[in-house]
Image (spheres, rainbow, N blue to C red):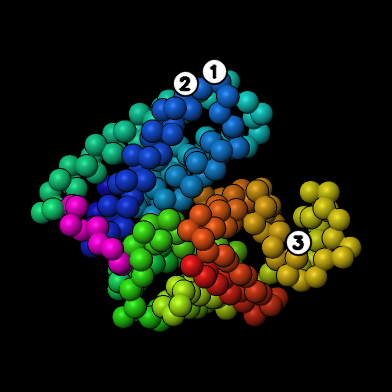
Amino acid sequence: MNLNYISNKQSFLNFYEYLNETNQYLKKSIGSDTEDIQNLFRCVHTLKGNAAIFNLTNIVDFCHDLESKLHVEKQIGSQLREELKQLYERLLLEYISIGEIVESFSDPKKSIATTISGQNIKEFIDIIVASTSKSLNKNILLNFIGISNAISSEKYEHIEQSLAHIINNCIDHGIKSSGVIDFKVEVEDKIIITISDNGSGINIDSFKLKAKEFGIDTINFNKEDFIDLMFLDEFSTKTAVSRHSGRGVGMAYVKSSVESVGGNIKVTSDFNLGTIFKLIL
């Protein structure tokens, strides 16, 4: 296990709690005959992304294979149930291993503050950028603005993994070989997090074609309507599935997590100029 991320103790503790919640959900799903397979698909896809952040490659590879099967199956049969059980057992071992590290902290409870600093957020985003850009062999420069600002840790815990999804989206979908990502944290009446890249932007024609596959009537759509399609489950213009994208799950998860804390997300984009994601919390 690569433990570089322990420099950001808050994110490490968040991940530890997330593993416990995910394992409890998997345990419940294994014994259920009524669990929605789409919910399981989202769970496994999100787990894959989170495990990649913390370099748990064995979990990433297992999840990638499992989500491919969940994507095409209509119900949970005996084979899928057995593989979910294997994932549960693997996660349990990781949870126990990470728990030993958590116990080595002087007082884990005190590490969970009511606010999280811009510096801690930057450390987490640095990890995402370094990991994904290395995996995709791209050269990415990160500009972080607002390092002196602090935001509610309660809200941050709900959106931390969404920030990772957006960064991965910028690197995988937007930036071709090299580019810049600007990450800005503002605290006014509300918390505003703006993430932008100077990549290829959104190709509306590609969105039109994908919408047609979904049976969506776009005759009266404006540009904003087309961009909002990215938040639909399974909506992706990627022609191939990779460890980072192509399932059409990430942005649906982002919208859901942002709205869960009473926020909203706005996306603007210009083809060949870049894309801007604005989270208002």
In the rendered image, the residue lying farthest to the front is 189
Tag 3 residue: 207
Classify mark 2: residues with Cα within 10 Å, few (<14), some (14-19) or many (20+): few
- Which element carries disc 3, helix, strand or loop? helix
Tag 2 residue: 31
**Label located before the other in sequence (3 or 2):** 2
The percent coordinates of residue 233 (x first, y second) are 65, 48
Q: Residue at x 75, y 64 (%)?
A: 226
* Marks 3 and 2 close (CB-CB < 8 Å): no
**CA–CA distance in space, label 1 to label 3:** 37 Å
The percent coordinates of residue 27 (x first, y second) are 41, 28
**Label located before the other in sequence (1 or 3):** 1
Q: Which mark is residue 78?
A: 1
Tell me the magenta residue range.
108-116
Q: What's the residue type where badge 3 is placed?
A: Phe
Q: Residue at x 60, y 64 (%)?
A: 173
Q: Is residue 240 visible?
A: no
Location of residue 5 (image quadrant): bottom left
**CA–CA distance in space, label 3 to label 2:** 39 Å
Q: Residue at x 56, y 71 (%)?
A: 277
Q: What's the residue type where badge 2 is placed?
A: Gly
Please say if 147 is above or below 68.
below
- Which element carries disc 2, helix, strand or loop? loop
